Image: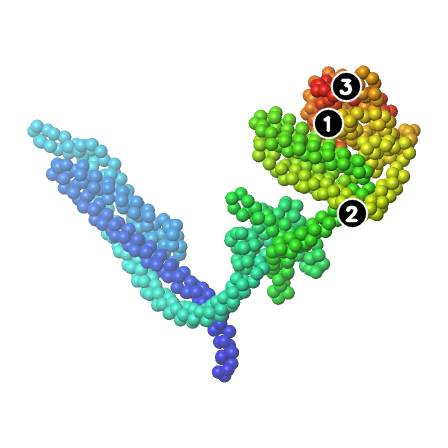
Amino acid sequence: MNSRLGGILKPLLTPAGLLVLVVILGLSFVAIVLVPGFELASEVAETSTALKLLGEQQRHPSLIRASLESMRDRLGARGYIQESLDQLRASNSQLDRGLHEMTVERPGNWFALTGATGASGAPIAGKHAAQLLDAWARELVVLKPVLAYHGVPYRDNESTGTNLNESGRDLERDLNAALRASRHVLPQLDTEFTAIANALQSTNVRSATQLRLVMISGLVIALALVVLVTVLLKARQRQESSLRQARQQTADILRTVKDGLFLLDLNLVIGSAYSGALETLFQRKDFAGLAFEDLLKSIVSERTLATALKFVKILWAERTNEKLVKTINPLGEVEVHLDAGNGKFDTRYLQFDFHRVRVDGEMTHVLVSVSDVTARVDLANELQASQSKAQGQVDTLLGILHIDPAQLSSFLGDSSAAMKMINAVLREPAREEGMFRKKLDTLFRQVHSVKGEAAALGLSSIESRAHAFEDDLKSLKEKPALSGNDFLPLVIKLDDLLTHLQSVGDLVSRLSRLHIAQPEVVHTTTAVLEQEKQKQPEGRADSGVAATLQQLAARVARENNKEASLKCTGFDMVPEDYRRTVKDIGVQAVRNAIVHGIEAPAERLSVGKAQQGMVRLTFQDVGDSGYKLIVEDDGQGLSTDRIKEVALKKGFITAERALSLDTKQTFALLFQPGFSTVETATMDAGRGVGMNLIADLTNQVGGRVSVATSAGKFTRLTMTLPRAAKRADDIEAA
């Protein structure tokens, strides 16, 4: 028996069971004590109010009778009756108003005074309401003439003295009638008032007795609640002690573990429990209740953030294969930028792992673990950089071995001069916007020249660095306003380019020393160069400049999926003073002719042309007139409409100006800095520097440029150079 009882009580003694008991007793307390107690207290308050109202009304019948008698006596004594009349009117008004309150239905919980059942909204007078109203109505009939009296009831006579006038006699008659009626009606009102008072008192006593019983019941239930709460608190204390121990152990684990750990709910909000390492990893402390999106949005790119949020949401889909989806984790190794203070950012690499958390088979959270893999990534990057550097050195070495020594020596000398020019331009002080823009144009031309010749020789490592330098220059050109600080980052890129050029020079020097120490190597290298020369197409010029341009034409055509041959004529007549100028102009002109002029093979065949395009570079000695450098291609020619369209789109001209431009003025736009008909910049075109560089180089030696073209047939650039190089500003487009 005891075991069965213990089995029944055991669940009730648990915190959950006790909580249920407390709730049940609490509801019982509300149902047994609070609700009835409130109603009974309301009854007591209402009956007390009714008794107060009734007490105030009980004195008015006596006052009315006294006022009537006073008026009659004063009228007989020919005295002043107005005071008694005012008192009568006041008592009449108050009694009439009080009877109205007692005989109408109340909006609250007023009880009928019949001694039977109470009904909400019943009048105070209850069953006595009809008798009260009837008696008062009869009383009002005889009182109204008296209450309505106004004036003076007397008249004075010298012989008889003060006598009643006609209105006085009427008033005396009305007073006597009212007094006779009051002897019957007013006692009836007193009787009804007494009966109502007795009923109210009985109701009040009954309600007070019931209220005491309710309060006693409440005390009993309260004592039971105190006992249960005491038991519940002790059980709760035992449970909290166990929970504290568990929480302490969890806190110790979270504080000690080196990885960042936290839980995400269905709304991708971080829970209140997380590992201490999380604060170190993210340099913040407000993780509890933080949205996962807010955690990432300031440290990763928008694209990575959007992909990561989609990935985590996929994990909540029950049909998603957790192992399979982990292979596409966008946060498997992500670069983050953390605020290090003072406007600086600390770059790290974090690895996020996601694991589903299930309770009773239902997915409740996603456990996220975060670890710092910066050291591992840095090591991998260093290894890759070392491999890339080694491979780059090997590629550079192999490239050097295939370059004619004269061409290589010429390139290194020209590049060194260009680097000195760039360094001087960067150091040159400037304050005005126009000077900053002029510096950018000069830097663009110098770097573009180095890039072009490096591309011609196949030195891709130098070409790519020069192209990166151009990217930074382009970004500066797009800025609405410039300052000296904007040029500071260029120093880093220049240093990288200089260092690489020096390393190439060092390799050449080492190879030279190696050739001297080991003649067989010289023989081998010479043999390689001879083999390369034998592979060159017939008619290739022996000049170093011509060879450079031949190599450039082949590479540009190949990388742009075109077929083109280059024929160089007269380059053995180039004076030494014009060697670099002709080479730089030729590099830009060949690239421009192949990229912009020569059509794709299929397009050439469709219009009846040979599949392979032809570019001709001719250097002519024209006697006392100087020299001419002619670059001609059999490509698609120039379209003045296309040139105007691009110039208008890029803001070089206005719509009104476009309508007024002639052919010569339109072709002049080709030589403006930044003008290019190619939408996307590549290694070979799109910067808007090549044609401007051609014009600038020609201008520097005092020459001029002319343009001739025929749609679908050819484009020809003619650079007229003076016999002796001199400074001139005449650039002609014809």
At 59% from the left edge and 34% from the top edge, which residue is drawn? 486
Q: CA distance from mark 1 to mark 3?
A: 18 Å
Q: Can you identify the residue that label 2 sits on?
A: 517
Dot 1: few (<14), some (14–19), or many (≥20) neighbours within 10 Å? Answer: many
Q: How is the image coloured?
A: rainbow
At 30% from the left edge and 62% from the top edge, which residue is drawn? 205
Nearest the viewer among 240 and 431 is 431
Residue 725 in view here: yes
Q: Can you identify the residue that label 1 sits on?
A: 693
Say what secondary structure mark 1 lies in: helix
Say the numbered circle drawn on residue 722: 3
Image label count: 3
Amino acid on which the number 1 mark rests in the picture: Leu
Location of residue 581 by image quarter: top right
Amino acid on which the number 3 mark rests in the picture: Pro
Residue 15 in view here: no
- Image location of residue 152, percent across then percent down: 18, 32
